Amino acid sequence: MTGTDRVVRRNGGGAPVVRFRAGEREGQPWADRLEVLDDSMDAAAAAEFVRAELPGWVVSADPELGRRLLEQGARPLRHAHTFRRDLRADPPPADWAGAPLRAGLRAVPCDRGPEELLDSWRAAFHPGHVDHFPGDDARALAERIGPLLAGKAIGPVLPSSLLAVDAEDRVVAAAVLTDRDGLPWVAEVFRHPRLGYPGLGADLLRRAIADAADRGLADVHLVVTEGNPARRVYEAMGFVLWQTSLTVIVPEAEDGVRAVGRA
């Protein structure tokens, strides 16, 4: 998922109705962080406008608009919560910088190829996980891990990112931080569950957050999918709910359906 261009869609009279950040997600055009600019328009009318203007698009918006789009035939993709941790008003404890890893593990920079992260990433996001990726390994490398590490999925990987490797130099966990349009973003935190080390992902994240604070970053953000138990871990680490969004895929335009606005 990529994109940084801000787009405004207008009605037939030229008045702005919605604004969003344009990108790509799941191989489809993506209207991220969509906002309704017309205060006189209720959620149902806004959903009708979006459905007519953005057929086939992925749309991320506030839950009320997302639910209205679902009622009009959209397909759910992700219900997520964005969290923020203030690193200045609430600096991380001093001992986070040296949070010990388990015996035999080392923390190293996030400079490995995507193939080295694949096994642990796959095991962490297994088929029963809310964030499971259903594609095969080739697609996972091409569409998720590869673009993430190359800075093409969200933004450049930040130097605070860390990997944990074992005595055989295998990647067993990761905390990947990126720059998302100027906001430090925790893009991935995972560990290989079958290799043990419970809590290792949180240990790495504490180190990464401490490093980010040392580098002068003001805050760090992350997104948690509804139903992911990791939310409790992040809240315990000082992350506070910032906003909630519902991401859906708008149905393709039906015969006879005419767009109600213009770009």
Image (cartoon, helix red, strand yellow):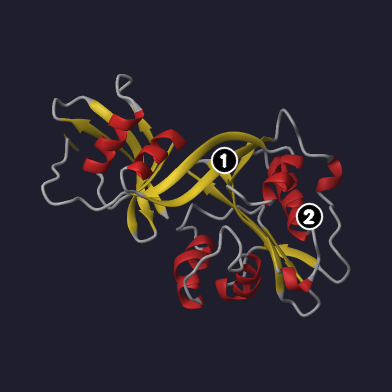
Q: Name the spot of residue 131 as percent of width and height, x first.
A: 56, 59
Identity of the residue furthest to the top in this view:
40
Q: Which residue is drawn at 80% across and 67% down?
A: 106
Residue 218 seen in render: no
Q: Is residue 262 left or right of residue 62?
A: left
Q: Which residue is drawn at 54% across and 63% down?
A: 149
From the image, tell me which residue sits under label 1. Answer: 82
Identity of the residue furthest to the left in this view:
256
Q: What kind of residue is marked 1?
A: Thr
- Compared with residue 45, is residue 5 higher up or lower down, i.e. above or below? below
Q: In this view, does 60 lie to the left or right of 177?
A: left
Q: Name the spot of residue 85 as percent of width and height, x first.
A: 67, 37
Q: How many labels does the image show?
A: 2
Residues packed near mark 1 inside 10 Å, few (<14), some (14 to 19) or many (20 plus): some
Q: What kind of residue is marked 2?
A: Asp
Identity of the residue furthest to the right in this view:
103
- Quarter location, residue 124: bottom right
From the image, tell me which residue sits under label 2. Answer: 203
Instruction: Please state, as top left, top right, bottom left or bottom right, where the N terminus lies in the image.
Output: bottom left
Q: Which residue is drawn at 38% across and 32% down?
A: 35
Residue 2 seen in render: yes
Q: Disc 2 vs disc 1: Cβ atoms closer than 8 Å?
A: no
